[in-house]
Amino acid sequence: MASTTVDEARARLVGKVRDLAYLHSPDEPFTLASGRQSAHFFDMKPVMMDPDSAHLLGVLIHAEIDDIGGVDAVGGLELGAVPLTGIAIAKARIGSSLRGFLVRKEPKGRGGRKTGNPPGIEGSSLAAGDRVVLLEDVTTTGNSALQAAARLTEMGCEVAACITILDREEGGAQAFAEAGIELRPLLLRSDVAGE
């Protein structure tokens, strides 16, 4: 079986997002998690749970990780980053040392007993000096992922970048740039919405 190129994966992912995740309602705007109103709505859960889409995401996420270089761990804020982290780890090369983690919105106090991570940082052990990449399903303002980045930075991790499935092109890239973190979108809203 031939491998999927990055260009093929991106082109196919646009169609998958359009078919499985995108709603457009110019007359009755959606209220987003950020509190903003928008005619465009993206629910990436059906995309992340679709086998073909998961393959495409794996190809694209690993192309970004390879380009960034020296990444020790990937993960991000629950809920959106959990399936993406699973996809990234499942698609890692055999023998890879790439680890996965998740950041809870509210620490439960149980995580970290075995790993040594502080409460709210779960999955693989992270240590000061680890170079991590955040994963996000949809980026609007970037606030949630930047809060996760701040918690990881407090641990002594270096947040190398944030890979998002889709940048809504509503200020997230600028917010990440101001925080000194590169936002690497796999797709832009305009790729899907045709604007």
Image (spheres, helix red, strand yellow):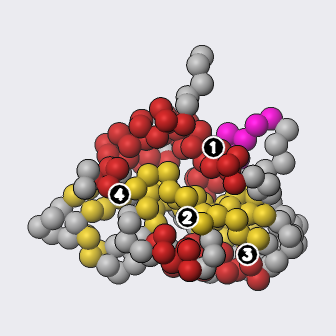
Q: Residues within 10 Å of mark 3 (few under 14, many from 20)?
A: many
Work out whether mark 3 precedes mark 4 in sequence or the reverse, and give the earlier one.
3
Q: CA distance from mark 4 to mark 1?
A: 20 Å
Front disc: 3 or 4 = 4
From this viewpoint, is residue 144 visible?
Answer: no
Q: Which residues, given as a range, are shown in magenta?
A: 89-94
For the point 44% across and 46% down, the residue is 47
Q: Give the tally of numbered discs.
A: 4
Q: Which residue is mark 1?
A: 63
Residue at the (72%, 41%) spot, across then down: 92
Q: Earlier in the sequence, mark 2 or mark 4?
A: 2
Is residue 193 shown in magenta? Answer: no
The amino acid beneath tag 1 is: Ala
Residue 38 to residue 57: above or below: below
Which quadrant: the C terminus?
bottom left
Instruction: Nearest to the eye among marks 1 and 3: give it.
Output: 1
Residue extending furthest top? 1
| Towards the viewer: 185 or 127 | 185
**Earlier residue among tags 4 and 1:** 1
Tell me if 166 is positioned left or right of 108 in this view.
left
Report which quarter residue 153 is drawn in.
bottom right
Tell me if label 3 and label 2 are in contact, CB under 8 Å: no
Which amino acid, mark 4? Answer: Arg
CA gap, disc 2 and disc 4: 14 Å
Quadrant location of the N terminus?
top right
Q: Residues within 10 Å of mark 4 (few under 14, many from 20)?
A: many
Name the residue carrying label 2: 183
Label 2: few (<14), some or many (≥20) within 10 Å?
A: many
Look at mark 3 in the image and give the residue it sits on: 152
Residue 189, which numbered label?
4
Q: Residues within 10 Å of mark 1 (few under 14, many from 20)?
A: some
